[in-house]
Structure formats: structure tokens, C-alpha cells
Image (cartoon, grey):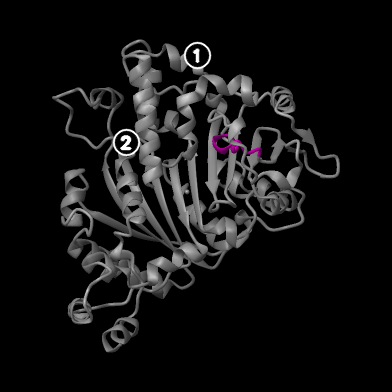
Amino acid sequence: MTSYRTKIFYCVLLVSLMLGVGFTASAQDSAGSPLLDMLARVPNTPVSRNEIYFNDRVAIEAAYPPARRLLSWAEFDSLDAGSDFDAEVWWRVWMNQSSAPTARYLVTYNETPDLLGFDYFDITQELSYGIPPNQTIQVAGSFDLDSVRTAFGNLGFEQDSSASIELWCGPSGCDSGLEQNLRERNPANMFGGDLGRKWPLIIQEGVLISSPSLPVIEHHLAVLDGQNMSLADSIEYRAAAETITRQGALLQAYFMGGESLLMMSDNGVVTALLGTQASPDAVREVLQTLLEDFETLPAYELLTIADVATETEQIGQVALVYSSAENAQIAADLIPRRIAAYQSLVTNRSLSEMLQDRYVEEVGTEIVEHPETGKWVLVISFATPKASAEQIIELRSDNTEAPEVTPPGIIFRILMQAINSRDTGWLNTATREQIEELIGS
């Protein structure tokens, strides 16, 4: 990050990593938790429950002092190696994260203030969820809402006077967010500009919510108006969120629920091992080997991956939500053994060796009970010593004598890469009966 060109290179690299990897009572109860605050604005619908990415820029300051968050694109543009130690620590931690899909807009960050009425660095937290064309971007931060209104007015947007919550829609109406207009394409607009679309925008104090889908927007309006339930009202999401935020600083997180969770119970491992053209005999042989000493992992209701930093450790966490203490305990006993025996389908290396390369000495398990929700959350922890601020700077790519420490965010990224490549056999919940049925078919 010694020049503008280098910084843009890092931005593009970060985007590539991303692409490799999509109220009322609850808002009051979640005070002090940015994650729960944001979940309190998310409709509890199948569309929203599939996959969720959370990123907290402010948490970096608490996790890696003396890190100082960049507050404007002007600060970013003037930042050179050694010019501002505290800001550079923050930047190097954040650019290494893999939970902020809006990072792709860093390549045009200097155009954002005039175009959208806020600086990209005004964002403090973001939540991205839903699968296109029903995706949503929710950003929290210090926004001058009058500037946002003026900017969107200049884009042809008008406020919908019929909505009880402030809603702005494009010149063709609130139901036109999916319409593409490549002649008006502007990649600096994170709310659909890459395809020339004009997504409806919900404006609240400190929060902007946008989606191309009008039904999705209407679900958000109903939640914000207190008429519908949010994900913060969902007992499994609340249990998971409270678990991963109870220890240290939560920098980023990922939730897998709904239909997406079904992929954790199929037998795709066979296809990954042998390919789609494998003969029936080859499939049977692999499955028969798999059945040796096989134990079924009890199905979980929600999977969460978290990046947590304490005073001394950086911890990648996998949190599985169960409705019984018995199933949580079975999983707690089984998963470490699976991890110890697991061979990555992508790298053809032992998962244990890959973790040891990142200074993870052991896999920890803990069952956290939530009496108020009736849920038990199994936390699998991959802890490694936390890099100091000085070591974070020394970890730059051109340093041939980089310190022997795990870069911030790397354990989280390894876990996310496993999810994205379906290299998660150690979390697979297929039953013995399912495998035996495949052998017999």
C-alpha cells in the first residue's frame, strides 16, 4: 500500500476473494450488538435465511489496537506506507477480510460521495443476504441523510408517499429495480449500478437498505413497521448471534440456513472425489469405505462461521445450533475426530496439517446453552495467537522475512473457502441409511 496504484491492486484482490466466496422489541433487546441490530431489520423469510455475510469495520479498532478506521476516501487516497501507522494497521486487517461484498466498489470509491450522497468509508457495518435477484444490501454508518436524499433525487428517484417507512424508488417506479439499462451503467453505485439498475432504497437514521426486488423491500418495510418478524426474533439466529458475540470482538460472520443448509446433508462428497462420470462400482467402493467406523453427525438447524479476536488470540469459529443437549454433545465428540481424519478434497492435504500451518495447535469445542431459546450451540474453535500491530505491518507481501504468525482473517477465510468449494465433509450430516441406500441403488 505504498501508492494509489498499489492500493487499487489490493482492492481488486479483495474483490476477487469475495467473489470466490453472495423494529421494535428485537431492536431494543439487541442494544450493543451491531449484528443483532442488523438482523432485527432482516425479514424472517426463506429468501433471507439462505446465506448472510456480516462485516464490522469498527470492531477492528477494538480487536487490533491501535488500529484506527479510515473515515474518508481522501484519507485512504493519502495513505502511504509509514504515513499513518494506526490507519495502516486497520486497513491491512480489513483488506484481508472476506465478508464484505461491497468491497468491489472500492475501485470507484472516489465517485461514491457525489453519486450516492455518502462516502464509502462512512459505512461502519454491512450485512449482505439473499440470492440474486432477491439479494439485499444493508449498510449502517454515519450518513448525512439529506445528502443521500439529494443524490438519489439527482438520479431520478422519488420518495414513495404511500410507504409508512421512508422509501425512495427509481423514475420507473418501485417495481422496476430489476430492469437493466447498460447505457446508465455506473459501477460506483453499489445499489444496482453495475447493470444500470435502480434498486429501491429504504432510508432510516444510520441505516440504508436496498434490494432490486420489490417483494423483498416490502418484507423489510413490514419488519421495520413492527408488523412482521425479523431474524433477530428467530430463536436459532438469536442463539447463534449471542454465542459468537459473547467473547472478544466479532469482526465478521457468515450464516447458512434455509435451503442452503440442505447441501450439508447430501452425498456430494462422492462427486467431489470421483467426478460426475464415476462408474457405479467406483461410487460403491468409496461409499463402502466411508461406512467403515461411520458415525452420523446429528443435523443442525443453523451453521455460523465467525472471526473473533480476544486480547491474545484470533479465533475462527464454527457454531452449530441444536435443539437438544444430547445431539450437541454427540457432535462435540464426533467433529474433532472427523477433523483429525479429514483430507481436503481441494488441496489433497490433511485438514489438520493445513490448520497447523496457520499455527492452530488444537481444535476446541464448547456447548453454550441458551435457556431462553431452548437451543444449544456447539462452538468449534480454531484459535491461533493474535498478530500484534507491528507484525500486521510486517506481514506485507513484499517482506521476505515476514513474522511467523497467522494474518488476521485467514482462519475465517479458510473456513469460507471450504464452504464455497463444498470441502466440508467433516460437517456433513448424511446418515448411514442414506449411504447404504446409495450403495444398493
Tell whether position 193 is magenta: yes
261 relative to 404 in the view: left or right? right
Indicate the position of residue 296 as horizontal and vertical percent values. 32, 77
Q: Residue 377 carries which label?
A: none
Indicate the position of residue 323 as horizontal and vertical percent values. 49, 71
Q: Which mark is residue 74?
A: 1
Amino acid type, mark 2: Pro
Instruction: Using the image, determine if residue 64 lies above or below residue 335.
Output: above
Q: Which of 280 and 29 is in front in this view?
A: 280
Instruction: Using the image, determine if residue 127 lies above or below residue 274.
Output: above
Amino acid type, mark 1: Ala
Q: What element carries label 1?
A: helix
Quarter of the rendering containing residue 35: top right
Q: Nearer the viewer, residue 29 or 148?
A: 148
Residue at image mark 2: 408
Report the magenta residues as a range: 191-198
